[in-house]
Image (tube, rainbow, N blue to C red):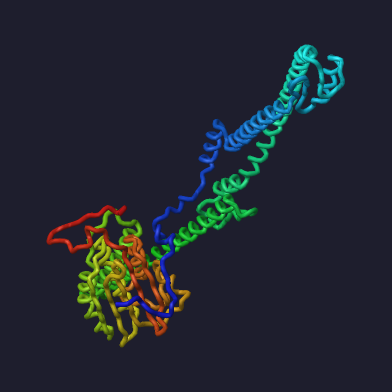
């Protein structure tokens, strides 16, 4: 069977719903304890804060960079100091500041500044003097450079500590905002947001991500509270009906055996409804918990059995039931897979119109087994499609189908998520739904049909 076709308005469970359903959260999980916060603050007091570590890192980097700069400057200045050389009968003084050195040395040798022409005897007399003066000037210059540079480095090191502390605080300010918000927000104030401002950098992205997390948690907690309220209402209705039946029967002084028997039968029917509702809730919780191990699942065989068992219901509802079953080997929990198929087929039969159709198909597409269920029925507004996959939600709350609990599609969505399958629902222009469940490719041991009596277990992490 081909992919489900409709108006093109599709619905898939959101990632947060696939990861954790509405019944998988604790209402006190987001509460912040004051005692825990104060204990954490006391624990941080005995450790170096991130701000202090960043400050020390900034100061260390500054000192290393400054020391490298001074070392390079020292060697550059040393290369520019005056040098005394002789070339034949001429004494030459080269390098920065050689003018003053030459004048002083020339005065000592009794000649004019600049290159000193002299005889061999005078050169021998003046050269040691000039070299001594050049060495003294070079040492004094380098010593003054080291002293002044050291003083400047010490001053800037002290200044860098303060500047580093201020810069570290400015950098960590968004993190303090996020931390304060995380301590302030609890399960009853998940509507609050950080709403980070400033440049679009990594810290703003962190704040936006935290806001998105709060949004998902808020939606999950609201769904949980709604689920608890709906479940309480659904459980209270059959209990109230059962109690009313028994009280009326007991207060009827003219009751006969037949009337008492009818009251007991109706009370039993109400009890059976409670059992079915509790079983459905347990199945929903089991599906949302996920699977620990995956076993071979023959979708074709499951669908064939489900179709054969429900042909009578389809005929009673004046529906045509068609099936196109092709081999489809999947991996998962056979019991949950049967419940998934049964819920989708029952939903297609129950919420249909007389003379309508139900089409069911299985097969493999691009190595992935799939299940499709398409049915006619009332027109579903596109904006209401996602709501139908939440517990106890119906298109028309006043319209209850006989035997329906309002959990069929919610259980189907949870089971599909537990099998890591993609569930896609599309509204049809003429009315009804087209639902496709696309399972992941089965592991290699499951690609072949299992032998008789063989049971293959595959870890869930595969």
**Is 232 left, or right, of 180 in this rendering?**
left
**Is 78 left, or right, of 303 in this rendering?**
right
Q: Is residue 270 visible?
A: no
- The image position of residue 46, as x and y in percent, is 55, 30
**232 or 127, which lies in front?**
127
- The image position of residue 197, as x and y in percent, is 64, 54
Q: Which image quarter is the C terminus in?
A: bottom left
**304 or 75, which lies in front?**
75
What residue is shown at x 73% (from left), y 19% (from top)? Answer: 139
- The image position of residue 107, as x and y in percent, is 86, 17
Examine the rendered structure and indicate whether residue 361 appears above or below residue 416.
Answer: below
**401 or 420, which lies in front?**
420
Q: Which image quarter is the N terminus in?
A: bottom left
Examine the rendered structure and indicate whether residue 151 appears above or below residue 350.
Answer: above
Q: Quadrant of residue 45?
A: top right
What residue is shown at x 26% (from left), y 60% (from top)? Answer: 333
**Is 380 left, or right, of 457 in this rendering?**
right
Q: Is residue 389 visible?
A: yes
Q: Quadrant of residue 436?
A: bottom left
């Amino acid at each position: 069977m081909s992919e489900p076709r409709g108006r093109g308005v599709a619905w898939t469970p959101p990632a947060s719903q696939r990861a954790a359903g509405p019944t998988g959260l604790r209402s006190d999980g987001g509460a912040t304890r004051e005692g825990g916060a104060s204990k954490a603050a006391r624990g941080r007091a005995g450790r170096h804060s991130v701000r202090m570590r960043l400050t020390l890192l900034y100061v260390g980097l500054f000192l290393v960079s400054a020391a490298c700069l001074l070392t390079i400057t020292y060697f550059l200045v040393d290369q520019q100091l005056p040098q005394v050389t002789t070339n034949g009968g001429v004494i030459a003084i080269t390098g920065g500041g050689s003018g003053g050195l030459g004048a002083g040395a020339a005065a000592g040798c009794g000649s004019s500044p600049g290159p000193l022409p002299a005889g061999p005897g005078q050169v021998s007399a003046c050269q040691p003097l000039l070299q001594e003066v050049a060495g003294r000037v070079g040492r004094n210059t380098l010593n003054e450079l080291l002293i002044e540079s050291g003083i400047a480095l010490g001053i800037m090191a002290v200044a860098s500590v303060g500047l580093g502390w201020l810069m570290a605080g400015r950098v960590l300010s968004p993190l303090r905002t996020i931390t304060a918000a995380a301590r302030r927000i609890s399960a009853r104030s998940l509507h609050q947001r950080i709403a980070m401002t400033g440049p679009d950098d990594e810290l703003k992205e962190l704040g936006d991500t935290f806001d998105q997390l709060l949004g998902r948690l808020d939606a999950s907690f609201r769904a949980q509270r709604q689920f608890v309220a709906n479940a309480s209402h659904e459980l209270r209705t059959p209990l109230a009906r059962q109690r009313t039946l028994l009280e009326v029967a007991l207060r009827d002084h003219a009751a006969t055996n037949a009337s008492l028997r009818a009251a007991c039968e109706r009370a039993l029917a109400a009890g059976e409804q409670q059992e079915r509702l509790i079983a459905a809730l347990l199945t929903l919780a089991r599906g949302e918990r996920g699977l620990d191990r995956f076993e071979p699942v023959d979708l074709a065989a499951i669908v064939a059995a489900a179709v054969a068992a429900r042909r009578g219901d389809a005929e009673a509802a004046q529906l045509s039931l068609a099936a196109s079953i092709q081999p489809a080997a999947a991996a998962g929990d056979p019991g949950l897979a049967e419940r998934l198929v049964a819920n989708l087929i029952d939903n297609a039969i129950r919420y249909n119109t007389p003379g309508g159709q139900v089409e069911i198909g299985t097969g493999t597409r691009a190595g992935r087994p799939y299940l499709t269920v398409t049915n006619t029925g009332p027109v579903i507004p596109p904006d209401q499609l996602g709501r139908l996959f939440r517990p106890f939600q119906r298109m028309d709350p006043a319209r209850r189908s006989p035997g329906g609990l309002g959990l069929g599609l919610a259980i189907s969505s949870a089971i599909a998520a537990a099998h890591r399958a993609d569930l896609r629902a599309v509204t049809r222009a003429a009315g009804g739904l087209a639902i496709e469940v696309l399972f992941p490719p089965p592991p290699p041991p499951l690609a072949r049909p299992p032998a008789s009596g063989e049971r293959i277990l595959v870890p869930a992490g595969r």
